[in-house]
Amino acid sequence: MTTMQSPSSGNWLSTPGYMQGVVWICLVALTSNTNDILMRLAGSNLPSMEIAFFRFLFATLTLLPIMLYNIKKGSFYTKRPALHLLRAALLFGAIACWTTGLTMVPLAAVSTFAQTTQLFVLPMAAVFLKEKVGWQRALATCAGFAGILCIVKGHSGDEGLVASLLSMNNGTLFLMAAAMMFALSDILNKRFVVEESTLSMMFYIALGTTVLGAYPAYHVWVEPSLADLGILALLGAGGNLILFFLLRAFAATDVSALAPFRYVEMIFAGLFGFLIFQEIPTFWTLMGAAIIVPSTFAIAYYETHHMRQTRCTPDENAAQPEGSLL
């Protein structure tokens, strides 16, 4: 009599499937929220420029052994060093702005802004990539920006929305600037980086951001404690894990099937914000989220539907290279 052995959890996660993809994407959300919490804790003692520098320094150090292990496979080879430098500059600015905003805005609002990158990608793609923007995507994008204004309004205090937009005293504006830089980096990936390996992209953007961030970090240097260094090391490793989990999720199942689960991050953020920082989402944050979530989901749905139609067109059967992830 033959007994069937149940696969171990590790083997189960390694196989393609819808539920495996859901688990991986939920791990992305959990790790992303954990990184936000760690950045806020580090931000209470260290400047944002120094946090951004250390985050990518430790990301580089954790990737270096993997790069050396795969050196015979050409892990260090790259065709576009200048492009990696530009991506690193954008990412350093984005992380510095994100860290600053984190210290000023509740986690629930932060996680909502984390979903807005696609809103900025759309108009940038129209300008830089000359992509045609249908009325459906344009309408969803405008609605999403209205949701952003709701959150900015909720954190503008007594100075009002217009005054808050003109001044940089509102943490949501730092998050907005970060989302714009993340979006521009995505555009660069889609436009140029089509022949680079994921490993080289991860390593060179981490290394480039470390080098570019060294001087700004030195200029505002505060001696980190051992506890701070531990938090920063976890940040670096967490940044690499986010990309790893994301790639495993996309390898397990269709991107469109995972789109609704990207918003699990907002649930984690609301829960952690309440339990750790005693934060309760404001009316304007909930209103903004209620607009941004369906708007970005509509864009993701339309993009997926449009891509499927394009692939089914006889004249466009050739596989198109997809932009790489940060």
Image (cartoon, grey):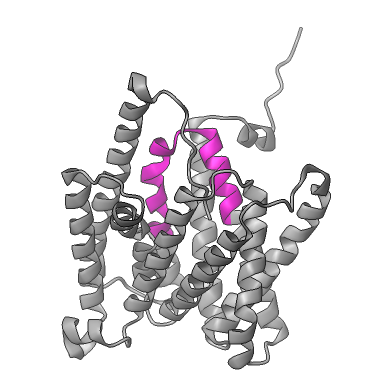
Kindly give the residue lying farthest to the top in the view shown.
1
The quadrant of the picture occupied by the N terminus is: top right
Does residue 1 appear anywhere in the picture?
A: yes
For image coordinates 37% across by 73% down, the residue present is: 177
For image coordinates 77% across by 60% down, the residue present is: 64
Residue 301 appears left or right of 228: left
For image coordinates 59% across by 66% down, the residue present is: 85
Q: Nearer the viewer, residue 271 or 317?
A: 317
Residue 46: where, in percent of width, then height? 58, 87
Which secondary structure is most common in the magenta stretch? helix
Residue 255 appears left or right of 109: right
Magenta stretch bounds? 242-268
Residue 196 appears left or right of 132: right
Q: Is residue 47 magenta?
A: no
Q: Quadrant of residue 35?
A: bottom right
Q: Nearer the viewer, residue 319 or 248?
A: 319
Residue 293: where, in percent of width, then height? 28, 54
Residue 179: where, in percent of width, then height? 39, 66
Q: Is residue 263 magenta?
A: yes
Residue 167: where, in percent of width, then height? 28, 88
Residue 175 appears left or right of 209: left
